Image: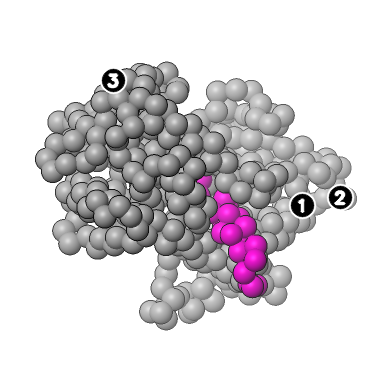
Amino acid sequence: MLHEGCNTVAVAGLGYVGLSLGVLLAQRHRVLAVDVLPERVDALNRKRSPIADQDISAFLNQRELDITATLDGDGAYAQADVVIIAAPTNYDPAQNYFDTSCVESVIEQVLRVNPEALMVIKSTIPVGYTAQVREKYGCSRILFSPEFLREGRALRDNLEPSRIIVGYPEAPAEMKEQAELFAAMLKEGAETPDVPVLLMHSTEAEAVKLFANTYLALRVGYFNELDTFAEIRGLDTRSIIEGVCLDPRIGSFYNNPSFGYGGYCLPKDSKQLLANYADVPNNLIHAIVDTNATRKEFVARRILDKAGWPEKARPVVGIYRLTMKSGSDNFRQSAIQGVMRRLQERDVELLIYEPTLTQDAFQGIRCCRELDAFLAACDVIVANRMNKELEPAKDKVYTRDLFSRD
């Protein structure tokens, strides 16, 4: 259990959530970072970030941090006052639910080696899940604290948080005190003064996370559908967006057209929230999930039109970058992959340029490592986000990127 002063913190999972939290807390606490991948453990122990995040790499070399990475979960959890669970929870379409097996595996391991430790779930989970696992394991010492981190900016978003939220159970009373102590740990590591801190029951905290990300997905989908309308009608999307977003109630964020929302959180969180709505009347939440597929289908059709398909037999469509954002190495659920799948269903040849890949093929699609050769080989080049290195072949490029961001 947590106490005032220096604590021993074990972090389960060295993805962008667990790693950024571990680095943040290692400023004032002893941190044992656990992962199942030896290459991640080795990188962190050599003061290198195992994920693409320049802030973390700089932090590891510029600050005095008490952080050690290990493959030995039992050893780390046995010493911990608190175990932060940042295990993956991918959405399982067959179950219509998050796959929470990794979270429960950590809970069971902690209960076996250190039943008095406080556990804080940072993984994204369904609404009501924390209460369910407390009952399942007969353990009240499980809190939930949602994260609000951007890919490639995870540490910066922990250092400058928009808010800190910790969810706790109604009983026993000491769990609220533990929630306060954990919130104070996060706040003391931040560089922003007067961070808003909200303590609430865990189920409300779970809902905050899913509703926040689903709203962001709504923003992406809204401006994508605005762009679809403008493109079909031959209108200037940029002018419309600028006129709309100068309204201070709307604002100029999450408004850059794309091929759809993707990444670690928005696709799975919006689907999970819709699953939680199973017996609740709704129209909007369902539409937010549906709009992503509609957008990808529209984009695929426009790419085929630009390639001259089907009149042109088997055109070469180049895919420029698989990553979600600049500064990221994440391909998971990137919007471009949904477009690629739709293109594969037609008689076109795909060619990928992704410099972070080392293999010759990705999901059966040939990769090209030389940019000039890639530009020359393609009839159309698909870029979710524009880059100046595409300028020599800009007439071939299909993108909806207007503002060179997001």
Measure the C-alpha gap from mark 1 to mark 2.
Answer: 8 Å
Is residue 330 left or right of 121 when viewed as pictured?
right
Describe residue 290's horizontal placement relative to residue 16 as left or right.
right
Q: Quadrant of residue 319?
A: top right
Q: What is the secondary structure assignment of the residue under circle 3?
A: loop
Counting residues from the start of the chain, the first of labels 3 and 2 encountered is: 3
Q: Quadrant of the N terminus?
A: top left
**Dot 1 lies on which element?**
helix
Residue lying at 41% horizontally and 79% vertically, measured from the top left: 249
On the image, numbered disc 1 is attached to which residue?
304
Badge 3 amino acid: Arg
Q: Residue at 29% of width from left, 21% of height from top? A: 45
Q: Is residue 259 left or right of residue 70?
A: right
Q: Residue at x 22, y 60 (%)?
A: 195
Sooner in the amino-acid sequence: mark 1 or mark 2: 1
* Residue nearest the observer in this picture, 339 or 75: 75
Q: In the image, residue 394 lies at what x, y percent?
A: 59, 50
| Mark 3, residue position | 46
Q: CA distance from mark 1 to mark 3?
A: 47 Å
Q: Residue at x 61, y 49 (%)?
A: 97
Question: Dot 1: within a 10 Å radius of its alpha carbon, few (fewer than 14), some, or many (20 or more) residues?
Answer: some
Q: Tag 1: residue type? A: Leu
Q: Residue 297 location in percent, x, y?
A: 73, 56
Range of residues picked out in magenta: 264-283
**Residue 257 disc label:** none
Q: Which residue is mark 2?
A: 310
Can see residue 327? Answer: no
Q: Nearer the viewer, residue 107 or 370?
A: 107
Q: Amino acid at mark 2?
A: Pro
In the rendered image, the vertical position of residue 72 relative to residue 188, given as above or below: above
